């Protein structure tokens, strides 16, 4: 079996492609020099190891000799793990969204040797299929254009670069008032799904930071509507198939609007954010189910995603044995055989096992439409434990063994929140173990790094690595008021400001000491995790209040105002900016 230039990489995603017949390069200067020397366009493929559609495109195209032959003859091909090189993923995602109106993974970028994209997309089938242009056709068309009308492609790359600079890098300044928070929540409520919870239509993402913001908003303004939106969403997520009722933990998103059919990959950040959200909701309503969800999710993370060294792994694949969701799904006959007819009948009624809830003729356990109390929850536990024991004998999905600084910091913060609310010091101890892992393994010569894999630390940390680590330290300080910890917080905030701060307001994604790919952008909108820029601003406002430093606090308010119009008008994508504004007005 042949190997390519990915053979020396440790990223689980890159390792998945080391035996492809495609002559992959990692993101190294040699690849760009070769493209320039040989006058070839670059094909850049960005993904991550637990991504189902990344696997699909790999199986259909990158493992195909015919496709590999075209790529190897006419292109220089580069593979990037988006979780290691968040900067590369972020900037090319802006181009992809600008050119196609959508984004996702795998992300497919065709660009010039000087890194300027001229054609983008996501997953492509290998050949033309039901009106969708196939990858083979795209490769042949681009190769022909590069040879016959290269000037057209070069002009296209310059135009799209100009468009992104004009439309994605400009700030929308507005002086935010306390009332701006209320206006944002009003807009969020307009897209709230009152029937099934969450926001908008399908697919639906849990977005735990949105829920935590709404709970903090309720705590300040006593607006019961915000609390009801948060509780409805938390109840719906838990009742749906997106929650693993057998083993605990949450999948990345639901493909339907009722939270029933999950996209089965499990990511550390989603579970960490939902631990915080359910804990904060429990603090208000004392719903024992919320407490059980928190503890079951923590147990899942400790069992399936904790490294022996103390950090937590990045994610668990959607696929096992080449089949999406196979580890989690059940045939009815299988369930009846395992549980016995009487117990199966109880489970069938409890978990909505009518035909409409099946995926590939297999059952997705869910409780949508059911009223559930803690007695019901405990009643079914014995059957779930039997199923869990049986499921453990299956071939498990692969785990991405990267330990990412920002995601581990989010989990540490959530554990400190849960520890305080549930008065459980053991949860705080797990959080402290994570911080110690980061201090020992992800800080190099005083510089926070982004990922640790099998003893190797690569790539200088981004703004979210600094801001999330600081946010976790602040949450711990909130619990114990340790003055030594305050000194550590001040030190890392000082360094963060030196590396990332923009004199026009806010923080760049990439530090001044790191590689800049095309543009030095700021990420102000929240995605699957909150904007590192907004977390940084919120953290400094917290520190300013602890130190009683009015100047520092006002500087951060101006940073918020530099993106104020978007924060006010598009609050669903700026909940962390709104949390920073809440902190300012506390």
Image: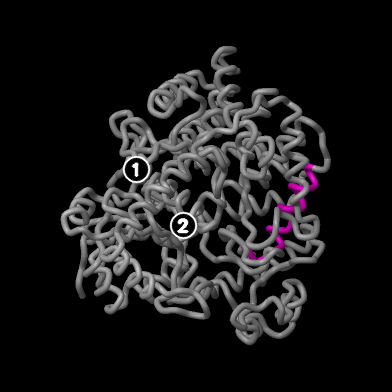
Question: x and y percent of residue 316 in the render?
Answer: 47, 61
Question: x and y percent of residue 429 in the render?
Answer: 51, 38
In this view, 254 is above or below 341: above
Relative to residue 554, is residue 373 drawn left or right? right
Q: Is residue 308 visible?
A: no
Question: Distance from label 2 to label 1 (Cα)?
Answer: 26 Å
Question: x and y percent of residue 162 in the render?
Answer: 43, 43
Residue range highlighted in magenta: 226-243
Question: x and y percent of residue 446 in the render?
Answer: 32, 28
Q: Main secondary structure of the magenta part?
A: helix
Q: Secondary structure at mark 2?
A: strand
Which circle's residue, 2 or 1, is located before the other in the chain?
2
User: Does residue 578 show up magenta in the picture?
Assistant: no
In this view, 175 is above or below 7: above
Q: Mark 2 vs mark 1: give the one in front.
A: 1
Question: Which is nearer the eye, 402 or 391?
Answer: 402
At horizontal 66% and vertical 54% (from top left) the residue drawn is: 293
Q: Is residue 312 visible?
A: yes
Q: Which residue is mark 2?
A: 315
Number of other residues with Cα within 10 Å of mark 2, as a class: few under 14, some 14 to 19, many 20 or more: many
Question: Which is nearer the eye, 31 or 119?
Answer: 119
At horizontal 28% and vertical 48% (from top left) the residue drawn is: 114
Question: Which is nearer the eye, 573 or 36?
Answer: 36
Q: Secondary structure at mark 1?
A: loop
Q: Quadrant of residue 62?
A: bottom left
User: Does residue 237 show up magenta in the picture?
Assistant: yes
Q: Which residue is mark 1?
A: 517
């Amino acid at each position: 079996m042949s190997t390519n230039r990915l053979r020396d990489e440790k990223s689980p995603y890159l390792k998945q492609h080391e035996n492809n017949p495609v002559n992959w390069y990692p993101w190294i200067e040699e690849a760009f020099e070769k493209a320039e020397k040989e006058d070839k366009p670059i094909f850049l493929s960005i993904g991550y190891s637990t991504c189902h559609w990344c696997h699909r495109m790999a199986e259909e195209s990158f493992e195909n000799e015919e496709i590999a032959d075209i790529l190897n003859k006419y292109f220089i091909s580069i593979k990037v793990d988006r979780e290691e090189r968040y900067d590369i993923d972020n900037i090319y995602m802006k181009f992809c969204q600008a050119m196609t109106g959508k984004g996702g993974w795998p992300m497919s970028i065709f660009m010039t040797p000087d890194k300027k994209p001229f054609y983008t997309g996501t997953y492509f089938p290998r050949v033309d299929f039901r009106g969708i242009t196939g990858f083979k056709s795209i490769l042949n068309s681009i190769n022909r254009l590069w040879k016959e009308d290269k000037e057209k492609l070069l002009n296209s790359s310059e135009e799209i670069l100009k468009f992104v600079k004009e439309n994605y890098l400009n700030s929308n300044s507005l002086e935010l008032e306390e009332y701006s928070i209320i206006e944002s929540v009003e807009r969020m409520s307009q897209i709230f799904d009152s029937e099934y919870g969450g926001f908008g239509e399908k697919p639906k993402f849990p977005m735990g930071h949105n829920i935590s913001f709404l709970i903090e908003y309720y705590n300040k303004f006593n607006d019961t509507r915000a609390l009801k939106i948060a509780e409805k969403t938390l109840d719906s997520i838990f009742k749906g198939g997106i929650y693993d009722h057998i083993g605990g933990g949450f999948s990345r998103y639901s493909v339907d609007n009722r939270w029933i059919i999950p996209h089965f990959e499990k990511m550390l950040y989603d579970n960490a954010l939902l631990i915080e959200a359910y804990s904060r909701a429990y603090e208000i309503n004392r719903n024992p189910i919320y407490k059980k969800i928190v503890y079951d999710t923590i147990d899942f993370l400790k069992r399936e995603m904790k490294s022996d060294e103390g950090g937590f792994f990045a994610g668990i694949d959607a696929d096992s044995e080449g089949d999406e969701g196979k580890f989690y799904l059940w045939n009815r006959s299988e369930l009846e055989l395992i549980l016995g007819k009487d117990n199966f009948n109880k489970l069938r009624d409890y978990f909505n096992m009518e035909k409409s809830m099946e995926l590939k003729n297999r059952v997705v356990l869910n409780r949508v439409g059911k009223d559930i109390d803690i007695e019901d929850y405990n009643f079914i536990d014995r059957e779930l434990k039997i199923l869990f024991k049986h499921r453990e004998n299956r071939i498990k999905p692969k785990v991405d063994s990267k330990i990412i600084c920002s995601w581990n910091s989010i989990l540490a913060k959530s554990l400190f929140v849960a520890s305080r609310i549930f008065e459980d010091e053991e949860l705080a101890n797990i959080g402290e173990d994570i911080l110690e892992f980061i201090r020992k393994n992800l800080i190099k010569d005083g510089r926070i790094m982004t990922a640790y894999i099998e003893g190797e630390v690569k790539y200088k940390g981004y703004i979210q690595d600094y801001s999330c680590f600081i946010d976790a330290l602040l949450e711990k300080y909130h619990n114990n008021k340790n003055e030594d910890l305050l000194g550590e917080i001040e030190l890392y905030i000082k360094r963060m400001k030196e590396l990332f701060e923009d004199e026009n307001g806010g923080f760049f994604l990439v530090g001044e000491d790191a590689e800049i790919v095309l543009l030095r952008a700021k990420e102000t909108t929240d995605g699957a995790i909150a904007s590192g820029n907004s977390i940084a601003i919120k953290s400094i406002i917290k520190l300013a209040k602890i130190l009683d430093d009015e100047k520092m606090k006002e500087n951060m308010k101006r940073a918020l105002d530099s993106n104020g119009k978007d924060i006010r008008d598009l609050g669903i994508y700026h909940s962390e900016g709104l949390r920073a504004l809440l902190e300012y007005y506390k």
